Image: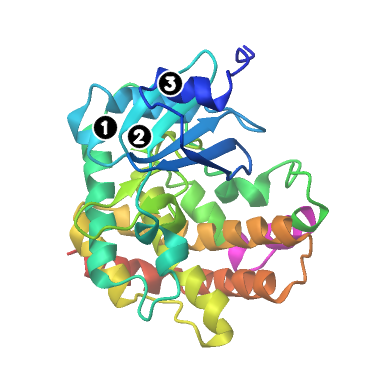
Amino acid sequence: MTAAAAPPVDAILRAAGVPPDGLALSDCSRSHEVTYAAGPGGRWVVKRAGDRSLAAELYAYRLASWHPRLASVVPRALLLDERRQVLVLEAAPADALFPAVSLDPGFPSPALAAGLGRALAELHAATDGLPLVTVAGCGIVHLPDAEPVFTGDSEAAQALARTAASDAALAPALRRVAALLSPSCLVHADVKWDNAILDPADVRLFDWELSGHGDPAWDVGCALADTTSLGVRLRGAGASLGMTPAGAALLAAYGRLADGFAERVAGFWIARMAHLALECAAAVEDAAHPVVVALLDAARAMAARYDELAGAVDGAGR
């Protein structure tokens, strides 16, 4: 069903109880129409459907509107309009967002990583076994056996996907973790440091458009992969491809490492590294870009050490 046309931003803000007069509006749109509104009384984000549907994100916030534990890991929503696919949220302070802190020495700190681990644990425990109408995707794990290999518009990403799908180390690792998938709860499905409010005492996740019923180990693996990918982007071949103090702190705080969970986390950690390489290739339209090559090489190297990574995950989570 096509969403009804969204009203203008000032009308949306009024409906959310925010008088728009005197607010400074900034267009932050990418795949969705996103407007940042700031004034003396506060800061808000207005999000409207663009190239991608907001149905899954709105569903997650609707769940949070009656589920206190889920509400504790998302920003406060002032307006949810499923028919027009409109969302209004309280915005986080700029100094609690990724652009302000990503280049700080030691980012992410163990304290911040532990905060994310607690948030993920709360999300997964609160929604374990809950009937859900949306399904989270982690299609990268099916890449070696997908037909076509990659359906995105980017020719560079398509070429990289074909390379990854036939790689002697990466393809077996992806097949291994695909066979272990164990969906059980609501997962965010796109856990990145730039999709979080970075307050160690109160980490919250936003950008839930890929969320749905899925495997909680995917979220944990994504968090580890994003930390690893930051090191690869900044330090190239000198980056650590194993457990870091931040990763260990995240896993210790998460604390739900049941039998088999560490093996899935390690597999998803590897898979997400390959996924980030595809995302980067699509963004720069160059499969041979040095960062793209570095990310895929990291995924390959980690795939060759799958069992070692699983052991590190298990040890850190105990």
Going by the numbered disc 1, the residue's amino acid type is Thr
SS state under label 1: helix
Report the quarter where the N terminus lies.
top right
289 displayed left or right of 214: right
Q: Does the magenta portion include 79?
A: no
Q: Distance between the residues labelled 3 and 1?
A: 32 Å
179 displayed left or right of 199: right
SS state under label 3: helix
Q: Is residue 28 among the parts visible in the rendering?
A: yes
Dot 2 crowding, Cα within 10 Å, few <14, some 14–19, many 20+: many
Which residue lies at the image location 36% right of the left edge and 46% below the top edge? Answer: 205
Say whether marks 1 and 2 touch (CB < 8 Å): yes
Query: Which residue matches tag 1?
Result: 127
Going by the numbered disc 3, the residue's amino acid type is Arg
Residue nearest the observer in this picture, 304 or 289: 289
Residue 101 in percent (x, y) is at: 40, 68
Image: 293 above or below 90: below
Query: Which residue matches tag 2?
Result: 186
Residue 77 in percent (x, y) is at: 34, 30
**Of pointers 3 and 2, the one earlier in the residue sequence:** 3
Going by the numbered disc 2, the residue's amino acid type is Leu
Image: 208 above or below 315: above
Q: Quadrant of residue 66?
A: top left
Image: 66 above or below 110: above
Mark seen at residue 14: 3
Query: How did the renderer colour the structure?
Result: rainbow
Q: How far apart are marks 1 and 2 (CA)?
A: 6 Å
Per the rendered image, the range of residues in magenta is 158-171
Dot 3 crowding, Cα within 10 Å, few <14, some 14–19, many 20+: few
